[in-house]
Image (spheres, rainbow, N blue to C red):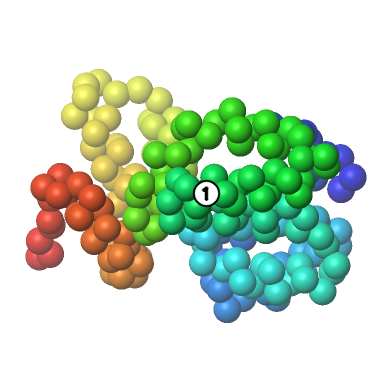
Amino acid sequence: METTITISSGHHIPRLGFGTYQIPPRDTEQVATEALQPGYRHIDTASYYRNEAGVGAAVRPCGLVLDSSKDLKPVYTAPSEAAATERFLEFSEKWANKYPAVIKLWSDAWAEMVPFLSFDVEIRKVICSTNAIESVNARIRKAVRARGHFPNEAAALKCVYMALMSLDPTGKGRRRWTMRWKAPLNAFQIAFEGRLTPTTSH
């Protein structure tokens, strides 16, 4: 597990990683701890998974240094552009000598990042979390590849529909996600009034 890859910030991370997506929060600490024992040092998590606390609890006893990432979080979670700028200046002063590539990366992309700060915190969580979307896209691609070709557009749409329905055949996941999305949907309704169409359960 010594082989690494270099990411855009200039950091090196292990090529082989351990994913925690869909691991229940109550099980995450134990599972991540067991993954660390044989040598995993690239543990993937995200706020969308809702199991970050478990991953942190597993990593903490190992003495692994989280380094600059903890100081960077106040930048992208800042309530305003002014606050984010202030936090970024503090971050730059502390880490410029050690991670100049990270500072440059954020500075170059600042204009693209700033509009993100105008959104409600619940919307930010959705924007930052693409794993659910990637999972759905992967299922659709798998279904399309298995079919090979389609005689018309209606057949293609039917294939996509069946793939989506297979994600939650019992409907239990739909009810669970409805509760999880309640706060983001309310935020979207306020930010984009009139653009969300309410659905009626039958």
Position of residue 103 in the picture relative to residue 65 (left or right) = left
Between residues 128 and 131, which one lies in front from this camera angle?
128
Q: Is residue 171 left or right of residue 106?
A: left
Please name the residue shown 39% across and 39% down the image: 115
Name of the residue lying farthest toward the right: 2
The location of residue 18, given as percent across then percent down, is: 70, 55
Query: Is residue 8 in view?
Result: yes
Q: Residue at x 59, y 51 (%)?
A: 87
Q: Is residue 1 above or below residue 55?
A: above
Q: Nearer the viewer, residue 30 or 162?
A: 30
Quadrant of the image occupied by residue 125? bottom left
Horizontally, residue 69 falls left or right of residue 5, namely: left
Relative to residue 112, is residue 87 drawn left or right?
Answer: right
Pointer 1: what residue? 84
Residue name at image x 35 percent, y 22 percent? 149
Q: Position of residue 28 (x, y in %)?
A: 63, 71
User: In terms of depth relative to the viewer, which is nearer, 145 or 134?
Assistant: 134
Q: Residues within 10 Å of mark 1 (few under 14, many from 20)?
A: many
Q: Quadrant of the C terminus?
A: bottom left
Query: Closest to the observer: 117 or 31?
Result: 117
**Residue 142 is drawn in which quadrant?**
top left
Q: Is residue 15 visible?
A: no
Task: Give percent across and percent down for residue 185.
Answer: 26, 58
**Residue 104, horizontal then vertical, whole percent:** 67, 31
Count of numbered labels shown in the rendering? 1
Q: Secondary structure at mark 1?
A: helix
Amino acid type for the residue under numbered disc 1: Ala
Residue at 20% over, 47% down: 192
